[in-house]
Amino acid sequence: MLHPYSDPSVGGTATKDLFVSAQGSYVVTAEGQRLFDGNAGLWCVNLGYGNEELIEAIAEQLRALSYAQTFGQTSSIPTIELAAKLAQLAPSHINRTFFGTGGSIANDTAVRIAHYYHKRRGESGRRLVISLGRAYHGSTLLSASMTRITEYHAGFQMLDGLVYEAPSPNPYRRESELSIEAFLQKALDELERLIDTLGPENLACIIVEPILGAGGVIVPPPGYHAGVAELCKRRGLLLIADEVVTGFGRLGEWVTSERLFDFSPDIITLAKGITSGYVPLSATMVSDEVHEVLSMPGDDIPLFAHGFTHSGHPVGCATALRSIEIIERDGLLDHVKKVGPHFMERLSALTELPMVGEARGSHFMAAIEIVADKVTKEPLHAGLEASRRIKQHCEERGLIVRPLTDYIILSPPLIMTAEEADWVVDVLADAIVATADELNIA
Ligand SMILES: Cc1ncc(COP(=O)(O)O)c(C=O)c1O
């Protein structure tokens, strides 16, 4: 295997990370260790592992119709039903879904739709994309180019001249003399300047994660998204909300942009939790206004020549439908709304420990940032080393966390109880203390 996001010179699979079974929030390794999966896989196993109802839905659909394509006017019943259900769950102005197989594909699709939209409106010059510093949007050539964790670009060729970066709206890293309000204004001013420098007539869209996940669970200042949406409207750009992580319950909402962040995107992308990671599926949802333009009658309409063999796969759609049913029946969004603030409150107390500069996030999406100096916020030289050691100590105590450069990410399954949340925070605290001792950091 060539492992994703790996050091190819190391190669192979570490036996302690070789998983052989899982149930609920716990995975079991080949060595027989049972671990609480504090990351729900890669932010995706929202309903936990081995859910019999999901397994049954998958088996039933495989028996009934194991494949159907969706090119042209072809479809299958679960695909149609899921499109209808998503239209109910999304903000009222967003009602049309294009199905894909993952977050990267969903974001590529969003940009291709933006291009098609502008061309159909006679604005073929609108090609360019703006993405935020520290954004993560995926691993295809286009979504990797929109990913602005630039250390991931080293060793590869990005799409030159298509994607431009706006400053990361990270309040923790703002200049110390700036208030949050001044920081917000500065971020929006800089974005506006970038739009004007590039020329609105050359710009297709801006893509934003409501909370920037893999970039460090960065929560932009209140008002940021609404400000971006307003700029997009004034300059004729489409706004894409990448809800691949934030959607499907992680923050206690199906879709967070309108309800939690007070903005109305033109396009929303969903993946990961949509099937709880059981099978691949993604959704790129467009507003009525965008769909109206895409479907405008006329002479010489260009074919919407975009699609994948597995677009709208009936098994993925049947899984998502059952998953939605379970989340609704079991009141899981309310559960996340209840346990999430408690989890965040407990995590925020970790800033009293050595090395922890900030604990941040929302509900079931969190990170702690490791720093050398809490006052200057200077990064720890051995940041990755520290976070890897913290991960190691957590695993010895039965908890999986995800170290990324100098932060540790937590994105537990939505079924995590308040007691489990307390245990997760206690284990992480122990692991931080043990690591600080090893590195002689007071
Ligand atoms: C916000 C966000 N968008 C897109 C993606 C890409 O999704 P995928 O890996 O399914 O292509 C990810 C993956 O972590 C993500 O976090």
Image (tube, rainbow, N blue to C red):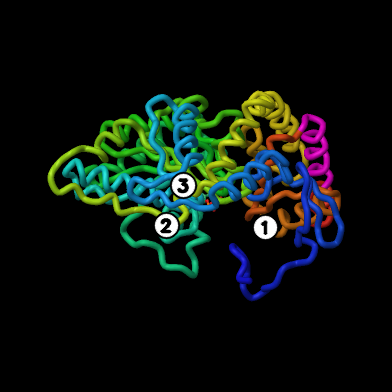
> What residue span does the magenta drawing correspond to?
417-431
Q: Indicate the amino acid at tag 1.
A: Leu
Q: Is residue 21 above or below residue 183?
A: below
SS at mark 1 in the image: helix
Which residue is painted at 21% across and 37% down in the image? 296
Q: Which residue is mark 3?
A: 312
- Residue nearest the observer in this picture, 435 or 226: 226
Image mark count: 3
Q: Quadrant of the N terminus?
A: bottom right
Which residue is painted at 50% across and 28% down in the image? 89
Q: For residue 49: magenta?
A: no
Q: Tell me the mark number nearer the camera, choosing from 1 and 3.
A: 3
Q: Tell me the mark number nearer the camera, choosing from 2 and 3.
A: 3
Mark 3: is the Cβ under 8 angstroms from ligand 1? no
Q: Position of residue 336 (x, y in %)?
A: 67, 29
Q: Earlier in the sequence, mark 1 or mark 3?
A: 3
Q: Which residue is mark 1?
A: 384
SS at mark 2 in the image: helix
